C-alpha cells in the first residue's frame, strides 16, 4: 500500500494477501473497507478505507 493521500501502488497477485494483512494490522478496528482492483496483467491496487474516511454513521 502507498502512504495516505497518494495513489495506490500496483502489487503482484502473490503479494495481495500480505498487503491486506498489513492494512488490517495498521488500521485495526478503524478499518471499514478494503478495495482490490485488478490493473494490467496480474497486478492489483489495494485501497484501505478507515472509519474516518468513510464518514457515515454506522451503528
Image (tube, helix red, strand yellow):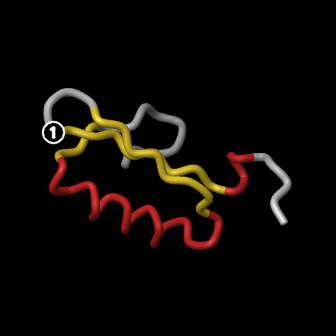
Q: Is residue 20 left or right of residue 10?
A: right
Task: Tell me if 51 is positioned left or right of 45 in this view.
Answer: right
- Near-viewer residue (13 or 52): 13
Q: Is 3 in front, or is 24? A: 24
Q: Is residue 9 above or below residue 21?
A: above
Residue occupying the point 20% across, 56% down: 15
State the SS at label 1.
loop
Instruction: Give the image quarter of residue 7.
Output: top left
Which residue carries the number 1 mark?
42
Q: Quadrant of the C terminus?
A: bottom right
Residue found 27% across the figure and 64% down from its top = 18
Nearest to the observer: residue 56 or residue 2:
56
Q: Nearer the viewer, residue 41 or 53?
A: 41
Residue 4 place in picture, x, y as percent: 52, 44
Looking at the image, residue 12 lies above or below residue 50: above
Task: Examine the rendered structure and indicate whether residue 13 appears above or below residue 23.
Answer: above
Indicate the position of residue 17 as horizontal and vertical percent values: 28, 62
How many numbered markers are drawn?
Answer: 1
Most extreme residue toward the top, as rendered? 40
**Residue 29 position within the rendered picture, expressed as x and y whole percent measured from the top left:** 62, 72
Classify residue 43 as left or right of residue 8: left
Residue at x 17%, y 46% (from the top left corner): 12
Q: Residues within 10 Å of mark 1 (few under 14, many from 20)?
A: few
**52 lies left or right of 28:** right
Q: Residue at x 80, y 49 (%)?
A: 56
Which of the 4 image quarters holds residue 45?
top left
Amino acid at each position: 500500500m502507498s502512504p495516505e493521500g497518494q495513489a495506490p501502488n500496483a502489487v503482484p497477485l502473490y503479494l495481495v494477501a500480505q498487503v491486506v494483512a498489513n492494512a488490517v494490522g495498521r488500521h485495526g478496528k478503524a478499518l471499514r473497507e478494503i478495495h482490490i482492483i485488478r490493473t494490467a496483467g496480474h497486478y492489483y491496487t489495494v485501497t484501505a478505507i478507515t472509519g474516518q474516511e468513510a464518514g457515515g454513521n454506522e451503528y
